[in-house]
Image (cartoon, rainbow, N blue to C red):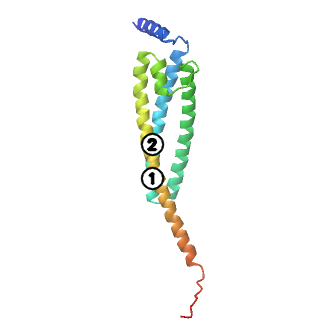
Amino acid sequence: SSTARTFCGFLEGARQGMTSPNYPSIIRDLKSILQQECRIQSEYAGVTAEEAKNTTRFNAARIEALALKRSDLCDRMEELQGRRRTLVTELCDGTEMKLSDAVEKCCLTQDKKILFPIIQRLKLLVHQARGESRELGGLTSFSLSLVNSLVTLISSGGRQVSRSYSRR
């Protein structure tokens, strides 16, 4: 009785103000984008952790390749987030709001049950990726300080030392 479910969903949507004929495609696209964001966030956290591991090993070639990959992932995340914001605004009839608020206020119950677990997973992955990024940032900062100290030490060793004596 797929027709009955669809009709009941339409009635529920009509009561909540969701009569847009684009509603099913918005939900489908939103689900797809959220799943893509989850994959990218997971990959980003992995790349960041691997970059940190290679930083401690001073593997410059691998670090450079991972940094480029991380940059590409950031660009893809930004693109998906922009598309998601557009869909959320369209879902809520032109009103901009946070994703979880939009799903709560503008989606049918059946769609909430599908979208909320994906949103929760995305939040956890974002938190994980931020933690990995903070760790990499701290490690990179320490490494740069170490290199700066070594450069200073090496450059000071090449300078001539002038001895000055006091009369005492």
| Percent coordinates x, y for residue 36 in the rendering | 49, 32
Marks 1/2: CA–CA distance: 13 Å
The label on residue 25 is none
Q: Quadrant of residue 76?
A: top right
Total number of numbered labels? 2
64 vs 72: above or below? below
Could you tell which of marks 1 and 2 lies nearer the N-terminus?
1
- Residue extending furthest toward the bottom: 167
Residue that numbered label 1 is attached to:
52
168 vs 116: above or below? below
| Percent coordinates x, y for residue 52 in the rendering | 45, 53
- Mark 2: which amino acid? Ala
- Label 1 or label 2, whichever lies nearer to me, is 2
Residue occupying the point 51% across, 68% down: 149
Residue occupying the point 58% across, 26% down: 86
State whether residue 140 appears in this view: yes
State whether residue 45 appears in this view: no
Q: Residues within 10 Å of mark 2 (few under 14, many from 20)?
A: many
| Percent coordinates x, y for residue 91 in the rendering | 54, 19
Q: Residues within 10 Å of mark 1 (few under 14, many from 20)?
A: many
Element on which disc 1 rests: helix
- Mark 1: which amino acid? Ala
The label on residue 129 is 2
Most foreground residue, 159 or 43: 159
User: Which quadrant is home to the N terminus?
Assistant: top left
| Percent coordinates x, y for residue 128 in the rendering | 42, 41
69 vs 5: above or below? below
- Residue extending furthest toward the front: 168
Element on which disc 2 rests: helix
Residue occupying the point 45% across, 55% down: 54
Left or right, 53 with respect to 21, comes to: left
